[in-house]
Image (cartoon, rainbow, N blue to C red):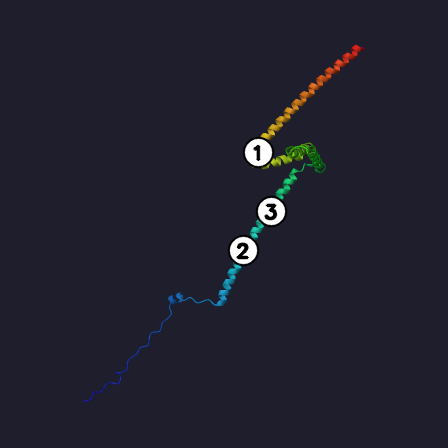
Amino acid sequence: MLVKKPIYDDLTVTTPAPKHKPSKHDDATFTPTPAPTDRLATQIRRARLFVYTRSLAAESKMDDLMSSFLHMESSFTNTIASLAPPKESGERLLPGGIYVLVAAMAGSIVSRNRNILLRSTVPLIVGIGAGWVVLPVTMRNVGDLVWEYERKAPIISENHMRIRGAAEEAWRQAKVRSAATARFVDERVTQAREKMEEWVKRGR
């Protein structure tokens, strides 16, 4: 007896795979690749920022250098102007400076046949002495300026004060001795004149 098979037994039912729906997590993990033009624009922007920062640094360095140069120039000009004597003092630098140079040259001529110590010190001493005689206010200003710089080095300032004290003491002693010598000479001259007058009176 023949049995009939159903005609649908050999057919296999295939269900289609569910389609994958994009989620928020997939959008977060997806990184699009930038285009070449975008990469080029980024590199150009970085280069421009680098050049800009470097130019700003160079400009600030140049400004600082010019400011320090102008400050030094102003300080030097003010220092030179402070050395000049005031108008009410009556000193004139042009003839006075010439006199000082002539005095220093005279000291060099006088000591030209001496040893090297005198040849190097005598013109300097004579020139400084002539400066104190001809330009006292200017020499005082120069001395004050030198003292301001010497105070920055205590050893030099102490030696300067010691030498200055010794020089002032020697000058004071010289003045006292010269006054005593002048007084002694005056007394002897007076005595000689009185004796001469007395001798003349007796001769009459």
Mark 1 lies on residue: 157
Q: The disc labelled 2 sits on which kind of residue?
A: Arg
What residue would you read off at disc 2? Answer: 54
In the structure shown, which secondary structural element does the residue marked by tag 2 occupy? helix
Q: For the point 64% across and 36% down, which residue is it?
A: 142
In the image, is 44 to the left or to the right of 173?
left
Give the mark, 1 or 2, whose residue is nearer the N terminus. Answer: 2
* Placement of 183 over or under 74, stated as above or below: above
Q: Residues within 10 Å of mark 1 (few under 14, many from 20)?
A: some
Q: With 29 as the anchor, is 148 left or right in this view?
A: right
Residue type at the position of mark 3: Phe
Q: Is mark 1 on a helix, strand or loop?
A: helix
Marks 1 and 3, the one that precedes in the sequence: 3
From the top left corner, tell me how far across and down residue 160 is, in percent. 59, 32
**At 37% across and 66% down in the image, what residue appears?**
25
Residue 190 in the image: state x and y as whole percent.
73, 16
Q: How far apart are the two marked residues, 1 and 2, measured between alpha carbons?
A: 47 Å
Q: Quadrant of the C terminus?
A: top right
- Counting other residues with Cα less than 10 Å from the Cα at mark 2, is it few (<14), some (14-19), or many (20 or more)? few
Q: Which of marks 3 and 2 is nearer the N terminus?
A: 2
Q: Quadrant of residue 170?
A: top right
Residue annotated with mark 3: 69
Please state which of the two labelled residues, at mark 1 or mark 2, is closer to the viewer: 1
Image location (x, y in percent) of residue 114: 67, 32
